[in-house]
Image (cartoon, rainbow, N blue to C red):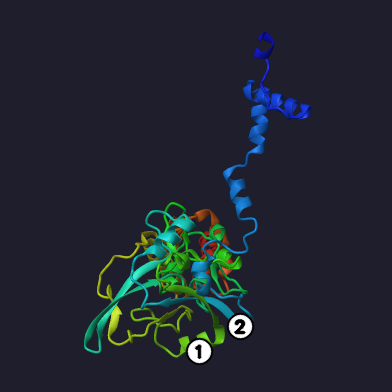
Amino acid sequence: MCFLQGMTLMPSGVKEEEKVDALELERAATSERTLVDALLEEQRSLTAIERFSQKHSDAVSPIQARYYKDLIPIRKPSTGEQYAFEVDMDKCTGCKACVVACHSLNGLKEKESWRDIGTIRGVVDNEPQQQTVTSACHHCIDPGCLSGCPVGAYEKLEDTGVVKHLDDQCIGCQYCSLKCPYDVPKYDDALGIVRKCDMCHERLAEGEAPACVQSCPNGAISIQLVNIEESRQKSLEGGSMVAGAFRSDYTLPTTNFRSKRDLSKSMEAADENDLTPSHNHVPLVWMLVLTQVAVGASGIDLLARAFDLYSSSTTSLVAITAAVVLGKVGLVASLLHLGSPLGAWRVFLGLKTSWLSREVVLFGAWMPALMVYAALI
């Protein structure tokens, strides 16, 4: 009996090898785990990321593709085509799901938004009408932001037509905001630069819809392929994309707003008559006033010398010194307007297209010349 107390009872007919294996398993289960055992077990377990990767390793398309596959093109743009937003206004309810999704995906600041919801209203066929309109960057054929930027912080991608903003190139002059009639570039005080919608082009490159397209519960936003030349001719014919928008012949926008109703008659933006103060540009005010005074003073000095109108050389010296001082103060004030003034040296990059770049280069050459002239006097 004592002998049986230390043994584990086995059913009859079990082989000797099976008995040994069972004893080893029982001993392993009852024995205390060591540190090495714990580390080996941890290495054999998969992390959440690894489990997710393993689960979707055989997936040929994103999980949500069934919801938006009909809202994006099945192919990439060919020669003479580009991507463009299309908005079905009959499906837009103004729920702002597209705004929230865009904000979340792109990590925007609290008051920053790359997609806006507006309202148009009026009377159509003797009935009052009101319609919400969702809009973002229109990825224009001739973008005003691109042509106006003095530092080349914009590019229009040749293969997709998407107008992309280069954050690391921007100096925060906000000239693109003044050039864009649709209020697309949004200035960020904390970063000192502007940013804008890029149609989630990296998602499109992988066959996935932009955030706004995926999030709309009614499928009101989609991505379409448009013929660039046809879109250009349509914009040059006059009119605007939607009631209340700026005329299309200025930047040739590609967004298509469609509706079964005729919303163009007697419709206007709901905020058409609202007086909302725009972003102030105090440094620019000082720059424009002081530099123009300096230019005027130096011009008057040249005329006075040419016609020998000065009673003494002291008067000329005072006038030209005042021009130099005022010009310098004005140019320094212009730097205070920039969100990233350390990049101001790049302003010559937009010399071919940007009037701001030409103005800066002109004043950059005029001030040293004025100083040399004053020194000679």
Relative vertical location of residue 260 with respect to residue 104 in this rendering, above or below: below
Q: Residue 300 or 108: which is nearer the viewer? A: 108
User: Residue 258 at x, y = what percent?
Assistant: 40, 82
Q: Residue 145 or 346: which is nearer the viewer? A: 145
Residue at x 59%, y 47% (from the top left corner): 49
Relative vertical location of residue 356 with respect to residue 100 in this rendering, above or below: below
Q: Quadrant of residue 47?
A: top right
At label 1, which amino acid type do we have?
Answer: Gln
Q: Which residue is mark 2?
A: 80
Going by the image, does 180 lie left or right of 366? left
Going by the image, does 20 lie left or right of 145? right
**Residue 199 visible, this orientation:** no
Q: Residues within 10 Å of mark 1 (few under 14, many from 20)?
A: few
Q: Residue 367 or 145: which is nearer the viewer? A: 145
> How far is mark 1 from mark 2, CA to CA?
13 Å
**Residue 278 visible, this orientation:** yes
Q: Which residue is mark 1?
A: 233
Q: Give the number of the mark in front: 1 or 2.
A: 2
User: Residue 59 at x, y = what percent?
Assistant: 62, 60
- Dot 2: what SS? loop
User: Residue 253 at x, y = what percent?
Assistant: 47, 79
Going by the image, does 329 lie left or right of 159? left
Q: Which of the two labelled residues, at mark 1 and mark 2, occupies the earlier sequence position? A: 2
Quarter of the image with the N terminus in it: top right
Q: Residues within 10 Å of mark 2 (few under 14, many from 20)?
A: some
Relative vertical location of residue 166 with respect to residue 72 in this rendering, above or below: above
At label 2, which amino acid type do we have?
Answer: Gly
Q: Residue 75 or 231: which is nearer the viewer? A: 75
> Is the Cβ of the residue at disc 1 closer than 8 Å to that at disc 2?
no
Residue 243 numbered mark, or none: none
